[in-house]
């Protein structure tokens, strides 16, 4: 019976050796916090970090595997003195001795108070960058002064500004209407664009001449605002212009060719009539008054 047990134990040991391979530690004795390398060769099952890690042994870094030699290497450490067991599997392990660090309690250093905080001396670069900052501020100030005192010469070199539009609202509107006439939009089939631009010119003129925010109002609101003003103007012209344009834009109406020119002529007449009613005139003493 005893022989049978021994034979069985030897067979089991051989089977476990085949499954878990050959394992050895580079050092089976290390100092506290030291490291040793576990090498496992020709195993069907290699120990994972989860198996090797326990309360006293830790895996350092990542495991490496040499495919040519079928060898797995794992760096281990421990911060607990004593004899520990590296678990290769649930049933197999090997001992690792961790030696404590000897502390000489007889040697005693003098205990001193905490030193006061000392300010480190300024470096050359710290001083130099403040000097650069100061010089930069001075340079910017001198540049600003020079630009201010030479602004006329600089303007001559750069050229004149865009000319200021000194035209009256009437002149701007009539010029825009004439430019629109020359575009010949409705003749090219762009009827909606023609009437949209026509009414936009009239709205801008009303806004510039009277202060009515015509560009933000509907057609009816614009007509009502003009009628309620103190200007002597025939609002039927404005109503005819807006009615034709609204029919084109919203009802997709197709006016007759003469109606396009008629709207243009009405716009010109309305601009002249309204401006004549509100334009300022100069008296003999140089003061501006409104025509009555």
Image (tube, rainbow, N blue to C red):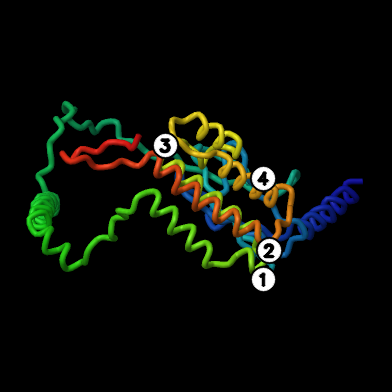
Across and down, in percent, residue 135 comes to: 9, 54
Is there CB contact under 8 Å for labels 1 and 2?
Answer: yes
Crowd tier of the residue under label 2, counting other residues whose Cα lies within 10 Å: few below 14, some 14–19, many 20 or above: some
Which quadrant would residue 13 be assigned to in this image? bottom right
Which quadrant would residue 162 be assigned to in this image? bottom left
Q: What's the residue at 50%, 45% (across, down)?
A: 203
Q: Is residue 16 visible?
A: yes
* C-alpha gap between disc 4 and disc 3: 83 Å
- State which mark lies toward you, 4 or 3: 3
Q: Earlier in the sequence, mark 4 or mark 3?
A: 4
Residue 121 lies left or right of residue 41; in this view the side is left
The quadrant in which the C terminus is found is: top left
Q: Which mark is residue 69?
A: 1
Residue corresponding to mark 2: 41
Crowd tier of the residue under label 1, counting other residues whose Cα lies within 10 Å: few below 14, some 14–19, many 20 or above: few
Task: Say which element carries label 1.
Answer: loop
Q: Earlier in the sequence, mark 1 or mark 2?
A: 2
Q: Earlier in the sequence, mark 3 or mark 1?
A: 1
Q: What's the residue at 56%, 36% (across, down)?
A: 223
Crowd tier of the residue under label 4, counting other residues whose Cα lies within 10 Å: few below 14, some 14–19, many 20 or above: few
- State which mark lies toward you, 3 or 1: 3
Residue 182 lies left or right of residue 131; in this view the side is right
Residue 8 lies left or right of residue 170; in this view the side is right
- Observer-nearest residue: 80 or 163? 163
Residue corresponding to mark 3: 211
Across and down, in percent, residue 173 comes to: 44, 53
Residue corresponding to mark 4: 50
Task: Say which element carries label 4.
Answer: helix
């Amino acid at each position: 019976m005893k022989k049978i047990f021994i034979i069985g134990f030897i067979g089991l040991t051989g089977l476990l050796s085949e499954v878990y391979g050959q394992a050895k530690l580079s050092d089976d004795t290390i100092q506290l916090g030291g490291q040793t390398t576990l090498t496992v060769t020709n195993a069907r099952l290699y120990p994972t970090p989860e198996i090797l890690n326990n309360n006293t042994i830790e895996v350092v870094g990542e495991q490496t595997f040499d495919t040519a030699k079928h060898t797995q290497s794992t760096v281990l450490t421990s911060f607990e003195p004593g004899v520990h067991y590296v678990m290769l599997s649930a049933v197999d392990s090997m001992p690792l001795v961790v030696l404590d660090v000897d502390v000489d309690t007889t040697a005693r250093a003098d205990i001193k108070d905490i030193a006061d905080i000392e300010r480190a001396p300024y470096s050359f670069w710290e001083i130099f960058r403040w000097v650069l900052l100061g010089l930069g501020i001075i340079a910017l100030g001198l540049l600003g002064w020079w630009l201010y005192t030479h602004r006329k010469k600089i303007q001559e070199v750069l050229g004149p500004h865009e000319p200021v539009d000194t035209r009256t609202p009437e002149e701007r509107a009539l010029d825009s209407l004439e430019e629109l006439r020359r575009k010949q939009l409705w003749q090219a089939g762009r009827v909606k664009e023609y009437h949209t631009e026509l009414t936009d010119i009239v709205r801008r003129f009303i806004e510039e001449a009277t202060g009515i925010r015509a560009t933000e109002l509907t057609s009816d609101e614009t007509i009502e605002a003009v009628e309620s003003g103190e200007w002597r103007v025939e609002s039927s012209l404005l109503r005819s212009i807006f009615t034709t344009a609204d029919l084109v834009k919203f009802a997709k109406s197709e006016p007759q060719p003469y109606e396009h020119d008629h709207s243009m002529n009405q716009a010109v007449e309305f601009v002249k009539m309204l401006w004549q009613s509100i334009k300022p005139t100069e008296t003999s003493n140089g003061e501006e008054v409104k025509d009555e």
